[in-house]
Amino acid sequence: MPPPSEPEDVPIALIITHELTRRFGDVTALDGLTVSIEPGITGLVGSNGAGKSTLVKILLGLLEPSSGSANVMGHDVERASRAIRSLVGYMPEHDCLPPDMTAAEFVSFMARCSGLPATAARERAAEVLRHVGLFEERYRPMRGYSTGMAQRVKLAQALVHDPRILVLDEPTNGLDPAGRDEMLALIQRTGREFGISVLVSSHLLGELERVCDHVVLIDAGRLVRAARLGALTGETGTLLVEVDGDVEAYCAALVAHGLVVQRDLLRVLVELPNGDDAESVARMFATHDIVRDVAVATGVGLLRMERRRGHLEDLFAGAIS
Amino acid sequence: MSDLVNTSVSTTVSDATNDTTIHDLGYQRYEGARDGVRGAWRALFGQGFRAMFGLGRPLKSKAVPAFVLAATMLPSLATLAASSATQGQLPIMYGGLIQSQLILFVLFAAAQAPELLSHDQQHRLLPLILTRDVTRDVYASARLAAVLCALLAVCAAPLLLLYIGEIGIAADPASAFAKMGTKAGPVLMQATLTAWVIGAIGAAMASMTARRAYATASVIGVFLVAAAVSIGLDDLAGVSADVSRFVDPLRSLHTMSLILFGEKTRAMELTAPPPLWMFAALAFSLGAVGVLATFWRVRRVRV
């Protein structure tokens, strides 16, 4: 149990694992994983077989660790798995919808399996299904559901007992781009507006970039990197300039003004001075002025000028390969 | 006219767009009661018991329960009618009726127990249920209880019908009840032990596989093989009927009913069968093995 006097603004780790290891015969799915996950939306990224699902199953108490420990909101996964069950909602990667049941029946049954009384279960089921965007369809057997509808039902059953943490295993699998966007928006809203922390696993880094606060990257059962996304993909010291006209001459003119310039087809990357002190900031503004003035002087059209943001792929590229 | 058509088309289109957008209706916290494990057990039991009779399932799933109930109740009614028409000249033979019904009870268990125990594995519902307020033992006990209760209802129905009918058609129901009162115990004991044996073995076999068809076949198979072995012991190995009878659960259940209701076949008049308690003990142990096997299996299912 966390001490009650814990100050609220200090982020308390939601999930902590320590030297967590799980072997299946000769295969080591998790290899001494030590990571701490904070409240908010956290992406769990790794290629297929990296150990994402194994980690998720251990956190849910479906699998026992071979060694090491894991802790969810102060509850040990082995000793207090029952306390964890009411705190966690799980959306599995695999199909789990009985084709002969309707979504309304199924979600309300899952609510009852979390101990909700029958009437409350029915009401919650209707509410949550509406929340994920299923209306009249919820009275049809799930046999005929599209992948998008099925994924929504799976999300609804994970939410129905009002958990504090949502664990979503590959929620965008099999969805078309539009469905993927909607699912991600739904996940983002669930995490941001309803105060439910989300642990979402995916093998696609790019899509998590849009919705996550934190990213945990694992590979071969080991932690590669865990960090806040803002820190990872914050603004870099590069100014991206797009011009229309004689790029060659424009670059030459910039270099003549003493700037470090890199050319990338029609785009020009201008290095900005680093540092927070007044002099650096002043020089940074001056650089923007030079870029503008030189464009006027050389007669090119300035199409775009922005600070370049780092991308997750860039950060993890080395780690994954 | 063409305006009307246009309107209807545009409505359909806008409906279709609505379906693909996610509506922001807010999310509400749940602050109400939580019944914990007990509520979860009741949900698993209730849903399972209904599924045993195909309730809340498509029409197709109701076929076998309906057939079994009809096929076991109708002979009881016919017997009652015959007995009533002959003013009780035709005695009502409980044991005789049970013999033909036992295989129908097996059919019921074989068709319906997989609806619960295989179904949850086939559609991978089990791993999901196990992340709720449900441990493997809670799951196994709730599903087993659902199968056993459904079997008890099905096994008791024709016997109770006979029992109540026999009192009802008597010229003097009051004195008939006084005489018949002693039969209530045998009726309940026979129904309970029959449900216990067939239900528990059926549940155990159904929990072994995620494939419904295999589950159904294996439940029927177990009882058929036992019957075949029992007959083989009789005919080929020349083992005495007392021993071979115990190998076949259905045959021992039938013999038990004959003893319970004080009815006798020709063979039983020649050599007295083993005492009742041996049959009861055998039935109890067979059911217990089924129950333990179900728990054993559910604890080991990979999720």
Image (cartoon, coloured by chain):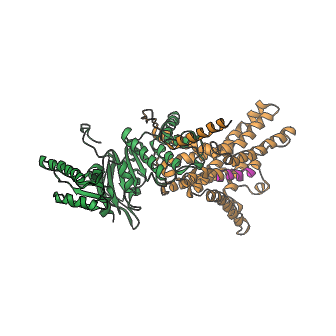
- Residue A226: name its quadrant: bottom left
Of B17 and B97, which appears nearest the observer? B17
- Residue B187: give x, y in percent of width and height: 69, 42
Magenta stretch mostly in which secondary structure?
helix
Q: Is residue A130 visible?
A: yes
Q: Is residue B100 rendered magenta in the image?
A: yes
Numbered disc total: 0
Residue B191 relative to residue B17: left or right: right
What hue represents chain A? green
Query: Which residue: 30% across, 52% down?
Result: A301
Q: Which residues are magenta?
A: B99-110
Residue A191, image x, y percentages? 38, 42
Q: Nearer the viewer, residue A53 or A321?
A: A321
Residue B40 among those drawn in magenta: no
Position of B294 relative to A137 (above/below): below
The shade of chain B is: orange
The image shows residue A245 at horizontal and vertical percentages of: 30, 57
Q: Position of residue A73 (x, y in %)?
A: 33, 44
